[in-house]
Image: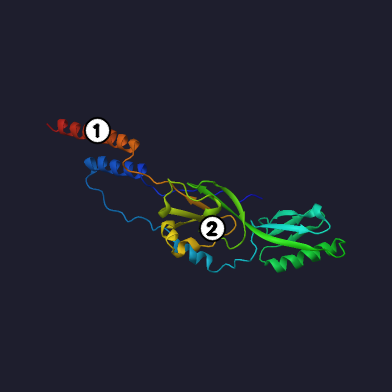
Amino acid sequence: MTPRAVRISPPCHGRESLVAALVLAVSAVFAGPARAQTPAATPTDTAVHADTSTRATGTLRSGDLLKIRVYRDSELSGQYLIDAQGNVQMPGVGVIRAAGLDPTQITARMIDAFRARGFRAPEIAIQPLIRVSVLGEVRAPGLYPVEPGVSLIQLLTLAGGPSDRANLKRAQVIRENHVFTVDLESALAGSAAGRVTLYSNDVVYLPPRHSVFSRDNISLAATLAALALSVVTLIQVSHR
């Protein structure tokens, strides 16, 4: 089963914030000064640490992969996904409960399942892997199967590192429909933000930097300024 799709909503910067500011300025001509509003709080890297503090890194979860090698029965070797119900399904062996176990426990349970199917002395090696997506301004975006305990900085290294357009201060970790903002610029300088532990189905998103003074934004600002001037002129003419 593939991980749940997560809708990513990058913070509003650059063009979007410029449009909002100019639209408010035009509205003020008609309605007077707008009341100041307190923006909603944005989760930070501290929240990511709090979210991971109660999770055991070695505990298997839905979305994890089990890389299984079966000696003398190589046709059963392969990678098996722990499904949404927390089970692993192996042809010829059956359904084995895996979520909530550590690697040693799942190995013992797997051996018992093989013996129950008539394997006399099964020899099995299991390597758990988690699956994490990296999107946005990285050099090699995609879905990465990695070892448990991988950190945010390690994952970005696997993805080729951030591109020149990446906004490192506004990196995001999307986990179970919650978005956490992480300052990777400070992480590269040695802060704890880069040591955030990732889990299966996490999505790491690096948004692009937005320049307020880009060509498109300057053109848009000129257009809206002309519109605002036209509105003011019409109001002045109508009051003469």
Please identify the quarter of the rendering in which residue 223 is found: top left
Are the two marked residues, 2 and 1, in contact with CB atoms closer than 8 angstroms?
no
Drawn side of residue 53 relative to residue 22, left or right = right
Residue 2's spot in the image, x, y percent?
64, 49
Type of residue at label 1? Ala
| Within-10-Å neighbours for mark 2: few <14, some 14–19, many 20+ | some
Up/down of 25 relative to 63, above or below: above
Q: Nearer the viewer, residue 179 or 129?
A: 129
Q: Nearer the viewer, residue 24 or 119?
A: 119
90 lies left or right of 54:
right
Q: Residue drawn at (41%, 57%), measured in percent from left and top?
A: 185
Residue 73, placed above or below residue 164:
below
Residue at 54% x, 62% y is 197
Q: Secondary structure at mark 1?
A: helix
**Residue 175: x %, y % from top left:** 53, 57
Q: Which mark is residue 226?
A: 1
Q: What is the quadrant of residue 58 in the picture?
A: bottom right
Residue assigned mark 2: 154
Tell which circle, 2 or 1, labels the residue nearer the N-terminal end.
2
Percent of width and height locating residue 44: 43, 60
> Which of the pair 146/12 is nearer the observer?
146
Q: Is residue 188 left or right of residue 229?
A: right
Percent across and percent down for residue 144 are: 60, 52
Front-most of residues 237 and 197 = 197
Q: Which quadrant of the figure has residue 55?
A: bottom right
Mark 2 → mark 1, Cα distance in angstroms: 49 Å
